Each structure stands twice: as structure tokens, then as C-alpha cells.
Image: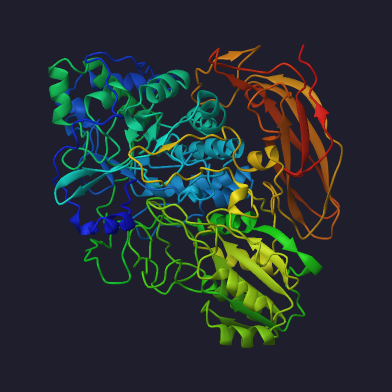
Amino acid sequence: MLFFNQSLLLFLGLSSSALASDAPDGPAEDPRLAHPEEGVYTGPLADGGNWKHAFDKASSLLAQMTLPEKIIFATGHKGPCEGNIPGIERLGIPRFCIQDGPTGLRFEGFVSQFPTAHTVAATWDRDLMEERGKGMGREFRGRGVHTHLGPVTGGPLGRSPLGGRNWEGFSPDPFLSSVASYITVKAIQDQGVITSLKHFIGYEQETFRTARWRINGTVQTFRQISSDIDDKTLHETYLPSFAEAVRAGSGSVMCSYNSINGTHACENDQLLNTILKKELAFQGFVLSDWDATWSNMSSALNGLDQTMPGQGFSIGGDFGATLVDLVNEGAVPIERIDDMVLRVLTPFFHLGQDKHFPDSPTNEPRDLTGGLLVQGNESDLQFDLTDDIPDVQGDHWKIIRKIGEESITLLKNTHHSLPIKRSTRRLAVFGSDAGPSLYGLQSCGTDNYCHDRSRPYFWPGTVTTGAGSGTAWAPYVINPLEAITRRARRSYTGHTQVDWVLDDTAYDYINITATRAEQCLVFVSSFAFEGYDRDDLSLWNDGDRLIETVASHCAETVVVIHSPGPVLMERWIDHENVTAVLMAYYPGQESGNAVTNVLFGDVSPSGKLPFTLGKSLEDWPPQGIIDELVDQPNATFPEGNLIDYRYFDANSIEPRFEFGFGLSYTTFEYGKASVKVKHSKDSKALQPTNEKFEGKGGLYDQLYVVSIDIKNTGRRSGSEVAQLYLTFPSSTPSQPPLLLRGFEKLHLKPGQTKTAHFPLRAKDLSVWSVEKQLWEIPEGELVVRVGRSSRDLGEAIELPELS
């Protein structure tokens, strides 16, 4: 979604108020524009796939439409939602409402702020992924939203740890991201809401992501990144989670701002027609990110089905009457227009949105400048709020709290510092991240970005989510200090005293309070937001110094981190007084309750890292974020498939904490893994893909099952995430040493043993052949290992040959 880069506008001597809505069309020519042959459409026409009944219903209505009516469904219009399709009253087709976002309903009050995608990925719990999706789907449907702009299924995947929107996606590991994407799409659409997968594809940085702004009524073109990805890397790393989301039946895909291999993503024939619609057999509609459409004819012929925000206020291609003219001139065939309409209406009918669907409200606070500027009072926004909107939260706070608890990852716990002992008399809490926001719930604008120029890298309170179009307002936030204080009074019979200092740099008060405490809880954070990439992996609010200061006086210092991804810990992680460290991610509105339940031992931590924590930024692949001011910036993805832990493994780099790592308050014993040949047909594809496979059976058929017994050998109940990693034959080119190919979370009582099972499909064991343009299982020894993390694995097991 569009989020204006304030720093760039200021650099140009402009302000966001200079952005006009009545700008003329953009530059007449751009080297990244595609030039298809006029009147020729090479992409496949939708046939409905497994949605045959809905497709036939859409076809019968299509036959009754005029050309202008057909193009209504390809064109965004002004209205109460972020994206609006007027519908056709005479045919009984209502107005369609399209709304952000990946963590809950953006712009809205009386809705839930769910944990972010990277937070639920840290649970490694399929049930929690499903419950989160169901809850979001219920809230979107309850507000009359037809298309949910989410989830983020690999754009960004998380190529660079500095990516400003990595927290909106699940994990830089394609397998973990794929599992979460499939589950989330199915769960949301089971509630009758269309998902729109974001952002297709190669959208891995905010810097130079888009190249146009309206300035004083004129479109200005600057620089736009091109993600140049080779075919093998695209298929093996960046496409899998989109493929799984298509298999889950997603009704829509959003094309991204960036160019791919030199062509704008929203008019890229190779990506939209050849890969998405032919190879993945996608039956839904492709809509553009807001103002990501650069042309009309080329976009239509190269696979774009719906342009947003559309007629009258798009910078480039806005369809509408222009598309009518192109059809009448023979530049765009009518079959292509019919295909657009069928792709939009088929998922609408398939999900039953024509029956008993709520009306969308007119509650529409709008802040399209990218957030309220706290310093300087530079916004005169008027929020048009109404009191008659439905409250759709239900009891979703329960799943939000549960995800917060189950995602928390215990990284260090020396001397059994946690859980907090009942004998502890004096606790002290430090850091602004432990307390309430200085500016309330919603005063930071619809992008949830409180920018105070006088204090860079400062966030005014506990961090529960990121900023931008992926954010959602919280109806309330339980901050950690509130929850800890309440818990200490309630459960510890008033004998535990809680003191605090919320000013991160009030060092005199910090020194005094830390000296008096038996145990100190330091809350620190890093903030990330759309439109900007992270400058570094440091903590905000001078968090490193805060930790060092407290630890210099307090023998038991516990650090809790709210972060959008990796942060560096080398200044303090080995300090003898830093006895415990928890990664708490972005947990949403129940943040304080979730972390308190873990700190006091009501819940044993069971989260595992969905990314790697390195020791320095140089540990990750170079050229992660391209920011050099050149005429045409290109990200060449030289690391190929070696992102995150794969790069660390391939280059023998010792991480601070490896991918999949996480401690518990109890202990687990792993048995010996075994493998069986167990073939079964794919039964999970709600919309089968057309991916080619050179082998027996189907690409998504199960071939093996690996099993292992795990016993809880401790005195507490707890959960363990067992993980399976695959190693391809050494003769297979461009492959990492290890690839995640299975995981299962087991909940175990003391002394209890359960068996983890890891089904392996043909695709899990395949590589992409660029020469043959298909998937194939390489010849040679395929080896799997099972263990606690990517660097704590059991003995190698060779998969037996298939008969």
C-alpha cells in the first residue's frame, strides 16, 4: 500500500501536503514499461478450476453486462473503503469493499490488533496460525469487507534483516512461510473473505520501492528498484509460499511496487501470465498495489485484472473509460475484459459473498500522508468517525494472548533466573517499552507512526505492532508494567514490591532503582515501518545503554525485546548479570498479559526463532538493501537461495542464536528418528497448480513419513517444536547445506512421551530445473536430520529409494 517516504520529500524541499490528487498522467515513457502487441493477449483465460459452480454463475451475469459495466470490476473508485468497486445494482451485484491489513482492520476502531505474522510464525503452531486467521476473517466479514489485503506470503520474505516490512511476513524460511501462508489463507477465506496475497514478487526493500510522487500537481519520476532474480532462486525461495497460498484457494494476488528483472511487477507478462496464471493455475484476480500501475494497455494485456486506487486518482494506469476506448480501438481484446470480470466475480460467488454479507460501514478516518507528525503539528487531518459501527472483536483477545505467550522465545536463562521466584521481594521494571504510549491508542495516525524529529530512534511506549498499511489500531493495550504490577499484587499476596523507571535515559533514577532491586526486568524495542528500511539492527531508545546500566547494578537482569526481526546483542549478551533474555516480537494488544504469564511461570516459553540472530550486520549476505543513488537501482540477489540461516550455514558463520532456537522451563529428550515410505495423493489443494514435475505421481503427493519420540523429562508441562531438515546430494547445485522441511509442536506433561511425524512430499525433495522448466528429485543421497533447532540436530538418516 502507498506510504509516502517523508524523509525523501523533505530532502526534496517538499512536504506531504504538496501531493495533489488531480495530477495528469505520468511520464509518457519509462524503460521498465512492457510493450505487448496491441490486440493480443497471451495469458491464459480463467476456467474456474475447482470453482466450477461459481465460475458458471459469474459467466451468466457476464453475459448480461455492457462493456462499461464490465470495466467497473477492473477499476477502483472512490468510496468508504480503501479500495472500492461500485458493483451493478440492476444485476444484484453489491459494492465491493477492499481493506487492509495483515494484523487487523486498518483505519478502524472497535477491532482487534492481532499479533504480527512473524510473531505467530515464532509459535511454530499450526493451530494458532489457523485461529488467528479465523479471527481476522470474522472481523473483516463483520465489517462488510469483501477483500482482505493480506496476508503477506513472501513479499517481503525477509531477504535482508533490514527490511522495513519483514514483520508483516512470516519468516525468511520458505517452508515455514509456506505452511503459515496456506493455513492463514484457508482460515480467512473459510469465513467468507477473499485474501489478496502480498506482494507479488521480489518486494524485499522499502528504499526505492516506488518511483513516483505527485508534487504540485505534476507527476515526478525518481528511482525505482528492480529486483533481478534468476529463475532457480525465484522458484525455490521466493515463489513457494505464494504457490501454497494459491493451493489454499486465495481469490486475489496483489502485484508489487518494484520492478522484476527490469519490468514493472504489475505489467510483467512472465510473472503474471506465465508463472502465476499458467504455472500456478491461479483462478482469482490480480489487483495492483496502490499506484503501482504504470500503464493501461500493457497492464491489461500482461495480466493485471484490477487497478487501484483507480479512476480519477491513480498516477499511472487507472483503467475506467480509458480501457473502454482501448477495447473499442482493438488494442485490448474483449476476451481479456471478460476474463477480468470472471476472475473478480468467481471468488465472490465461491465464498458466498452474494448471500447475507454485511454492509460495509462509512467509518473512514483517512490519513494518506503516512502518519501524524507529533513534532510540529503538521497535520490538520479530520477523522470522520461514526458511532454506529459494529464491534467485531468477540473474544479474539484470547487467541491474541495465547499467540503472545506461545511465541515468546527464551534465548538465555542462566542460574534459572526465570521464572520469577515466589520468594522475590523487590522487582524493578525499566524502559519506556514497559509502559503505556505517551500519545494514546490512535493519535499517531492511520499508519500508527509517531515520529518525533527531536528524538530520532525513539518510540513513545510499549511496541505491539509496526507502522504503515500493515498496522491496525488496538482497542486497548495491556502494557507490561500494568500486567506485572497487577500479577505481583494478586498472586504473590502483596509481598512482592514492583518499582519502575520508564524514562530510558534517566540514568540517576535507573541506578538508584536497580541497586535496590533483587531482580530487574528491562524492556527494550526496535521499531519498523512501511516506506523505510532499518538503518541498522540496533535497539531504539538507546536500549543497549539502558541494559548495560541496569546490569551494572542488578545481579539478575532480565531483558525482554519487542522487535520486527533480528537485533544485535553483542554489547550485553555475555554480561554476567544479564541472566535471561526473551524475544517477544510484536504481540498485539495483549502484550503485557502474555509476557507476564511467561515471566511468572504460568506458561513455559516454547517459541522458536523464525529467523537467525547474528553477531554483526556483516554476518548476513551483502547487498541486502540497495540505497545507492543511481539512475536505475538494481538488486541482483547474488546470494541466490542462501538467505538467513542458509547463508550462515553455507559460509560457516557462527550465529548468536540460530534459526529455530528457543529454550524452555522444562527439558526434553529426543529418541531415534525413523523413516517409512508412505505414499498418498495430495488432498489439500483447494485449487491445484499446474506445476510440472518429472517423477511418479504428483508434485504435492506424500512420499515418506519421518517419526521421532520426544519425552518431557522435566518437572513442568511444556511444549517442544521438533524440526526436520533436509540435505540434498552434494552434486546438486545452488543448494544450502540444510533446508527446513518439517516441524511439529508437541504439548507434553512431565514424564509424557509423544511422537512427532513429518510427512515429506515430492516437492519438499525437489529442485527446479531451469533447463527443463519443471521440478525434479535429484539423483543421489537425500538425508534428513531431526532436532531442536537448525544447529542442534540428531544423526543423519538417508531416505530409502522409492520402488
**Residue 560, located in which quarter of the rendered image?**
bottom right
Left/right placement of residue 418 relative to residue 541 reads right
Vertical position of residue 465 compared to residue 85: above or below: below
| Vertical side of 183 occupied by 395: above or below | below
Q: Residue at x 36, y 44 (%)?
A: 208
- Residue shown at 29%/15% (left/top)? 41
On the image, the x and y values in percent for residue 375 come to 32, 72
Image location (x, y in percent) of residue 493: 69, 83
- Quarter of the image for residue 441 reads bottom left
Left or right, 752 with reference to 31: right
In this rendering, the answer to whether 478 lies above or below 116 is below
Residue drawn where x is 54% and y is 29% of the image: 233
* Residue 661 location (% of width, % of height): 71, 50
Q: Which residue is at 13% across, 17% downward?
A: 329
Depth check: give the residue in front, 76 or 527.
527
The answer to whether residue 136 is left or right of residue 718 is: left
Q: Nearer the viewer, residue 451 or 243?
A: 451
